[in-house]
Amino acid sequence: MIDHLSTYATDFGRSKAFYDAVLPELGVAIQMESVASWDPDFPERRMAAWGPGRPVFWLIETREVYTPRHFAFTASDRATVDAFHAAGIAIGAADHGAPGPRPIYHPDYYGAFLLDPDGNNVEAVCHAPSR
C-alpha cells in the first residue's frame, strides 16, 4: 500500500547514524544521499533514503521541530527484532519498549520500540509465530 515515506530530522547527523545502525539489522541498506540544492529556502538540506533495493524510507533534514511519529519496520523473525533493538541501544537510542510479545495486537505479534534522536517511535515487528 505505501510506496515510500519520509520523516524529518533536526539533527540530521545523529538521526542518520541511528538509522545507519538499526536498519541493516532488518536487511535494509542505504540507497542514496543527496542535498536539496534546488530548494531556495534551504539549499543545503540533506536527505538520505534506505530500502531493500530502492529508496523507501527517507530522512530529510529540517530546521523546524515537528510532532514525532510512529512507524514500524517489518522483521523476518524475532531474532531480527532483538538485533534491531540491541543495535539501537548500543548507539545510545532511548528504549521505548523492549523486545517481546504484544498479544493485545494479535497472538503472534512480537515487537521492539526505540526513540530516534527526534523522538519518533521506531518499531521493528515480526508477525510470524514463535517456533
Image (spheres, grey):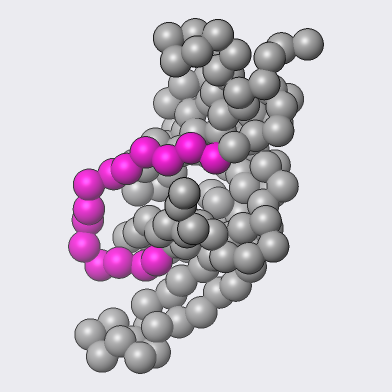
**Residue 121 placement (x, y as % from top left):** 39, 36
- Which residue occupies 45% across, 82% down? 35
> Whole-percent x and y of residue 94?
45, 32
Residue 8 vs 112, above or below: the answer is: below
Q: Name the residue: 35% across, 48% down.
A: 118
Q: Nearer the viewer, residue 103 or 96?
A: 103
Seen in the picture, residue 79 relative to 114 is either above or below; the reply is: above
Q: Where does the magenta region start and end?
A: 60-73
25 left or right of 104 in image:
right
* Spot occupied by residue 66 in the image (x, y as percentages of width and height): 22, 53
Q: Which residue sits furthest front?
A: 1
Q: Quadrant of the C terminus?
A: top right
Residue 46 sits in which quadrant?
bottom left
Whether residue 90 is visible here, answered yes or no, is: no
Q: Is residue 4 visible?
A: yes
Where's residue 23, x and y in %?
62, 47
63 part of magenta stretch: yes
Q: Residue furthest right?
A: 131
**Residue at horizontal 40%, vertical 47%?**
117
Is residue 20 rendered magenta in the image?
no
Residue that appears at 50% across and 13% down: 106
